[in-house]
Amino acid sequence: GQNIDQPTEMTATEGAIVQINCTYQTSGFNGLFWYQQHAGEAPTFLSYNVLDGLEEKGRFSSFLSRSKGYSYLLLKELQMKDSASYLCAASGGSYIPTFGRGTSLIVHP
Amino acid sequence: EADIYQTPRYLVIGTGKKITLECSQTMGHDKMYWYQQDPGMELHLIHYSYGVNSTEKGDLSSESTVSRIRTEHFPLTLESARPSHTSQYLCASSVRGEGYTFGSGTRLTVV
């Protein structure tokens, strides 16, 4: 079976740094995805981690620890437009990711 | 500019009607997927395809069918719409090792 766990909601201040955590239990794990989804819109791809470590992509970074079944998405220099839901998805033996419910991030001035 | 297109964007239909949700992509991706998503909830896989003439069932497939006659086209059909089908339907495509590209979605309301 597969299970994804991430916080339901987080709030942060514009200009700050926020870390969104995700834990997963996936048979035959082969990768961890992060997506951003604004209200009423489709998800957009942010990152894909296969190996342990930190992958940096501009203001967004994603970390993976395969041994701990743990990932986080780090958002720096927060902007109001970063207010969205952030979906963690773990890919297993079928290479079809299982999605979590998402973390709703609210950025306030 | 979108590379994966879904139509219609919004649909209101009566109970018992047969409906087909369209999805087309221009990226030449072999893998395509249909997901259902209710507000604030996770995406649930309905059907997926690894290529032409290949279709597989996901978790919520029992009341719908798909076809993949051409690489670029992956329509989803509900044979008899029910109010419980009211939801957002998202089509996506991918290549192995990369993230999904999602369409804009079809928001379906069954009355």
Image (tube, rainbow, N blue to C red):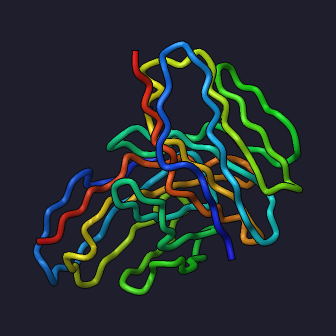
- Give the vertical position of A36 relative to B18 (above or below): above
Q: In this view, does B81 lie above or below B49?
A: below
Residue pictured at 22% horizontal, 79% vertical: B81
Expressed as whole percent of the image width and height from the top left, the position of residue B29 reads 62, 53
Which of A108/A97 is in front?
Answer: A108
User: Residue A88: horizontal and vertical position, in percent?
Assistant: 61, 50
Left or right for A72, reference B69: right
Q: Nearer the viewer, residue A44 or A37?
A: A37
Where residue A69 sits, quadrant-wise, is bottom right
* A77 lies above or below B100: above
Q: In this view, does A61 lie to the left or right of B107?
A: right
Residue sitting at x 24%, y 62%: B108
Q: Where is residue B16 in the image (x, y as percent from the top left)?
A: 16, 84
Image mark count = 0
Residue found 63% across the figure and 55% down from its top:
A89
* Quadrant including the C terminus of chain B: bottom left
Q: Residue at x 66, y 50 (%)?
A: A22
Q: Does any portion of residue B55 appear in the rendered image? A: yes
Q: Which of A50 and A14 is in front in this view?
A: A14
Specify whether B62 is left or right of A65. left
Q: Position of residue A29 (x, y in %)?
A: 80, 63
Q: Which of A36 and A107 is in front in this view?
A: A107
Quarter containing the N terminus of chain B: top left
Residue B69 shows in this picture: no
